[in-house]
């Protein structure tokens, strides 16, 4: 049993080291939300939601978000109501004890394209599209990984054979992924005139996914800065008071 335990530990450690090594070799990118004073670009978040809605939503859910949360990224209440009303949710039971369908409201969670996991797998050759609510927290430097993954589709090298229903991606573990390339140049038309090339579209949707995983990011940073300033001032006052009280004591 001890030998088996150490063998399993060795294999797990090896896989973790390999994943960490892959992360180190992966390009890092500039993001508006990085750093202690980083903030979200609301225009980018709104574009990112448009990308999610038109490209990703057909397969991936975001079960932890409510439509009302979109007001935090600059959508008005009327716009959120209009967005939610385009979806249908199952509600009930009514007075007769029956379930019924109604238009979604801002207080409803994002509606999934699939009724359950089995339906999702059946529609994707057995692969289950992960929920994207906190996908950027799935691994270290998650936003860089997802961005690189989205733009990392290539034709496979001659010495590599890709399995049926799989696609070659240079940043995917094992270089094979079940998801076909989702983003191309001009995949989405931006209302604000932003260049809709592949990299810009990928960057916007990743920013939106980062916000969905950490909507409190800006509040947390502001609180952290205030706490640091408070303790700096307090430390200075305490230091000066200590020197004054103990300056004659040897």
Image (cartoon, helix red, strand yellow):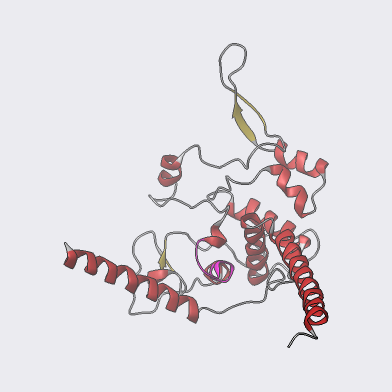
Farthest top residue in view: 96
Give the position of the C terminus as an image quadrant. bottom right
Q: Taking 39 as reference, is 168 left or right?
A: left
Against 41, residue 248 (above or below) is below
Q: Quadrant of residue 184?
A: bottom right
144 inside magenta stretch: yes
Q: Taking 182 as reference, is 102 left or right?
A: right
Q: Residue at x 51, y 78 (%)?
A: 26
Query: Can residue 55 be seen at all in this image of the molecule?
Result: yes
Q: Residue at x 76, y 85 (%)?
A: 249
Q: Quadrant of residue 5?
A: bottom left
Q: Position of residue 233 (x, y in %)?
A: 81, 73
Q: 136 or 183, which lies in front?
A: 136
Q: Quadrant of residue 241?
A: bottom right
Give the position of the N terminus as an image quadrant. bottom left
Q: Position of residue 193 (x, y in %)?
A: 80, 65
Q: Give the total of numbered labels.
A: 0
Q: Position of residue 45 (x, y in %)?
A: 72, 59
Q: 100 or 17, which lies in front?
A: 17
Q: Taking 202 as reference, is 125 left or right?
A: left
Query: Can residue 39 be seen at all in this image of the molecule?
Result: no
232 inside magenta stretch: no
Q: Residue at x 64, y 55 (%)?
A: 212
- Specify start and end residues of the magenta stretch as a single range: 138-145
Q: Position of residue 169 (x, y in %)?
A: 46, 71
Q: 119 or 29, which lies in front?
A: 29
């Amino acid at each position: 049993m001890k030998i088996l335990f150490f063998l399993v530990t060795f294999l797990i450690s090896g896989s973790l080291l390999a994943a960490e090594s892959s992360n180190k070799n992966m390009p890092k990118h500039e993001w508006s939300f990085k750093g202690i004073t980083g903030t979200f670009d609301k225009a980018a978040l709104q574009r990112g939601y448009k990308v999610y809605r038109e490209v990703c939503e057909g397969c991936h859910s975001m079960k932890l978000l409510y439509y009302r949360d979109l007001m935090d990224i600059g959508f008005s209440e009327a716009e959120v109501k209009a967005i939610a009303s385009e979806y249908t949710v199952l509600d009930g039971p009514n007075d007769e004890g029956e379930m019924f369908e109604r238009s979604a409201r801002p207080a409803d969670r994002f509606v999934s394209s699939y009724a359950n996991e089995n339906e999702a797998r059946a529609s994707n050759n057995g692969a289950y599209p992960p929920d994207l609510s906190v996908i950027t927290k799935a691994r270290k430097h998650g936003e860089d990984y997802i961005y690189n993954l989205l733009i990392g589709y290539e034709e496979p090298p001659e010495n590599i054979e890709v399995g049926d229903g799989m696609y070659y991606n240079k940043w995917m573990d094992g270089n094979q992924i079940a998801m076909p390339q989702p983003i191309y140049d001009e995949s989405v038309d931006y209302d604000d005139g932003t260049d809709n090339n592949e990299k810009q579209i990928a960057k916007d949707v990743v920013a939106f996914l980062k916000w969905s995983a950490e909507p409190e990011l800006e509040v947390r940073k502001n609180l952290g800065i205030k706490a640091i300033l408070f303790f700096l001032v307090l430390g200075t006052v305490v230091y000066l008071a200590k020197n004054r009280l103990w300056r004659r004591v040897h």
